[in-house]
Image: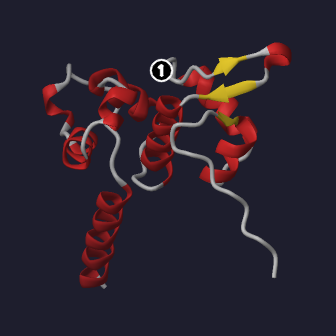
Amino acid sequence: MAAEPQRKSDLAFRTIGELAGDLGVPQHILRYWETRFPQLKPLQRAGNRRYYRPDDVALARRIHRLLNEEGYTIRGVQQLLRRGGGAAAEAGNGAAREAAAAAPMTDAAPTPANQHPPFPAEALRAIRKLLADALAEES
């Protein structure tokens, strides 16, 4: 039986390969996120080798969750992080963190007509079901 690899402490720095593996995304996605989310700033050593601090790891996990589980767009996550404070909101307790992530967009500045606030995936699924039911009633 093969021995299970040792897990790093939550306080340890992670390389881009380790964080990419933890999140299940390719490394280039993390590098792309660094260009889109200025809050995500890993340490860079010789040869541009990236080391993600615990706060960076928490922020990357939050970005991943918002994009891939809750259905936000890049622009929506950018707005959310600007309003919510990025890694600081992630470091808080779970209830506060979820409340910040689920806060309605109504208290933000008015959204320009050509931009729409992000919708969580579950809300979009509910809308799709309502539309499908309405179309089925017409038939």
Q: Answer yes or no: is residue 32 visible.
A: yes
Looking at the rendered image, the quarter that the N terminus falls into is bottom right
Q: Position of residue 84 (x, y in %)?
A: 28, 27
Could you tell me residue 132's position as x and y percent?
A: 33, 75
The number of numbered badges drawn on the structure is 1
Q: Which residue is drawn at the image coordinates 52% and 30% (left, top)?
A: 56
> Is 77 left, or right, of 54 in this rendering?
left
Task: Report the quarter where the C terminus lies.
Answer: bottom left
Q: Residue at x 41, y 34 (%)?
A: 77
Q: Residue furthest right?
A: 47
Q: Label 1 neighbourhood size at 10 Å, few (<14), some (14-19), many (20+)?
A: some
Q: Looking at this rendering, what residue extends furthest in the top direction?
A: 46
Give whichever of 132, 60 is nearer the camera. 60
In the rendered image, which residue does mark 1 sit on? Answer: 39
In the depicted structure, whether residue 76 falls above or below residue 66: above
Asked where in the image residue 66 lies, by quadrant, the reply is top left
- Amino acid beneath label 1: Gln
Image side of residue 34 versus residue 106, left or right: right
- Between residues 90 and 77, which one lies in front from this camera angle? 90
- The vertical placement of 44 against 134, above or below, is above
Circle 1 — which element?
loop
Is the image coloured rainbow, by chain, by secondary structure, or in one colour? secondary structure
Q: Residue at x 56, y 45 (%)?
A: 9
64 sits to left or right of 1? left
Q: Residue at x 18, y 39 (%)?
A: 104
Q: Is residue 114 visible?
A: no
